[in-house]
Amino acid sequence: MDRRIKTALLLIGGLGVSLVLAVGLGSERLAFFELSNEHRAILFDIRIPRVLLAACVGASLAAAGAGLQSLLRNPLAEPYLLGVSNGAALGTMLAFVFFENFEWSRPVLAFVGAGAATFAVYGIARSRAGMNVERLVLAGVIVTTFLSSVIVMLASLLDAAKLRSFTFWLLGDLSQSTQNGVYLAFAVSVIGTVVLVSQARALNLMMIGERDAFDLGVEVGRVR
């Protein structure tokens, strides 16, 4: 068996064990073979949605990080570098302020904010001579700094309860996890991962340099 397949199977097995342990551990001990109505609610309405949502989010972050590292040819690259995370944070803050009672508004506005930040970065980095990694990173720093300033300004206008909820969200709070949220996160994670995997060869070639990748037949602009 190929070494990479063995490694993948080992990691998948480790993930499965981690998920089972995460579901089983908590302040309330659960007897899985004799679940009361209360314990059933804790298991299926609280723990499982939170654990599955955390797994989907972690998988999405891993896929996004791998894609950005290939795109920027930097093993330390991550979504914060191009303003994606700050754009999502700003979108979520707007959801807390204007659409607090609508559960769907947070992921939707987070996606819109991240997309808008990405387009802004590419718009700033683009020039008549084209686009290179250095310009892209500098544009990302500019957009990230600007969005951070906007977030701080809006945070000063929030009441204590909304500010606390937003702060917990930034820290990775999963207490509001629902089955619908898990379905949405799973769908987004699968679609994004499939798209990245379909471009794996092009991204790998771009790591050796955009000019070399272009010479080898990669449409650098389209892939980027």
Image (tube, rainbow, N blue to C red):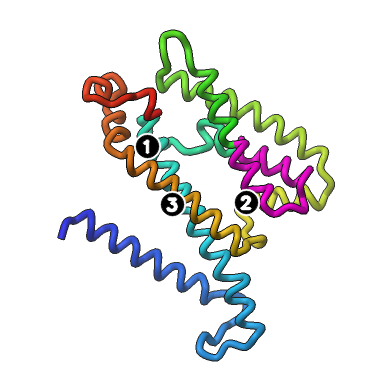
User: Which image quadrant for residue 195?
Assistant: top left
Q: Considering only order in the chain, which callout, 2 or 3, is on the residue closer to the N terminus?
A: 2
User: Which image quadrant for residue 141?
Assistant: top right
Majority SS type along the magenta span: helix
Residue receiving disc 3: 190
Q: Is residue 5 above or below residue 18?
A: above
Disc 3 marks a residue whose amino acid type is: Val
- Marks 3/2: CA distance? 24 Å
Q: Is residue 202 magenta?
A: no
The region drawn magenta spans: 87-113
Q: Secondary structure at mark 3?
A: helix
Q: Is residue 34 above or below residue 185?
A: below
Residue receiving disc 1: 75
Badge 3 crowding class, 10 Å Cα cut-off, few under 14, some 14 to 19, many 20 or more, is: some
Residue receiving disc 2: 171
- Marks 2/1: CA distance? 24 Å
